[in-house]
Amino acid sequence: MKVTELWEKKYLFLSKFVPLNIENIEENRRTYRELLFSAEGIENYISGVILFDETARQSDKNGKKFIDVLTEKNMVPGIKVDEGIQIIPNTQEENWTAGMDTLAKRAAEYYQMGNLISH
């Protein structure tokens, strides 16, 4: 079983898109993800995909949610539940994981969307 993380933050796409002169906008990121998820036989190599919030809410060009695309290929969709690392105010750059205060609410929403695992 192979689980792949696809929760790339928007700025990480710069390394993929800039050399190809592709604008880093949501539609281009969606198209890139659709290309990955619709690849012939991908389910033979990947059994689960951990998504970022943006990806979990996106659909393919026909309107099918990516979560459903993955599920139909017998790949388990999951979600990255934290909201990233942030510096604690008034400290010397000490960090905390944002999103823990709203985790229960977001986890319930993500589960209702079809995300079955979390990271």
Image (cartoon, rainbow, N blue to C red):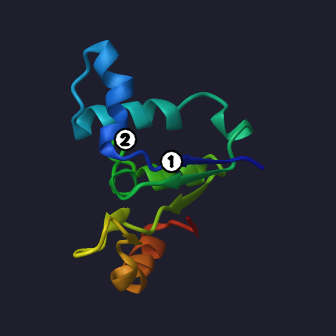
Q: Position of residue 108 (x, y in %)?
A: 43, 81
Q: Which residue is mark 2?
A: 60
Q: Quadrant of residue 117?
A: bottom right
Which residue sits furthest front? Answer: 92
Q: Position of residue 15 (x, y in %)?
A: 37, 26
Q: What residue is disc 1 on?
A: 69
Q: Secondary structure at mark 1?
A: helix
Q: Do residues under tags 1 and 2 come within 8 Å of each other at their CB atoms?
A: yes
User: How many residues crowd mark 2 within 10 Å: few (<14), some (14–19), many (20+)?
Assistant: some
The span from disc 1 to disc 2 (Cα, nearest Å) is: 8 Å
| Residue closest to the eye, 114 or 86 | 86
Count the labels in the image: 2
Asked if 90 appears above or below 37 in the picture, the reply is: below
Tell which of 91 and 73 is nearer to you.
91
Amino acid on which disc 2 is placed = Asp
Q: Position of residue 28 (x, y in %)?
A: 28, 31
Residue type at mark 1: give it: Val
Residue drawn 55% across the image and 48% down it? 5
74 sits left or right of 26 in the view: right
Residue found at x 73% / y 37%: 44
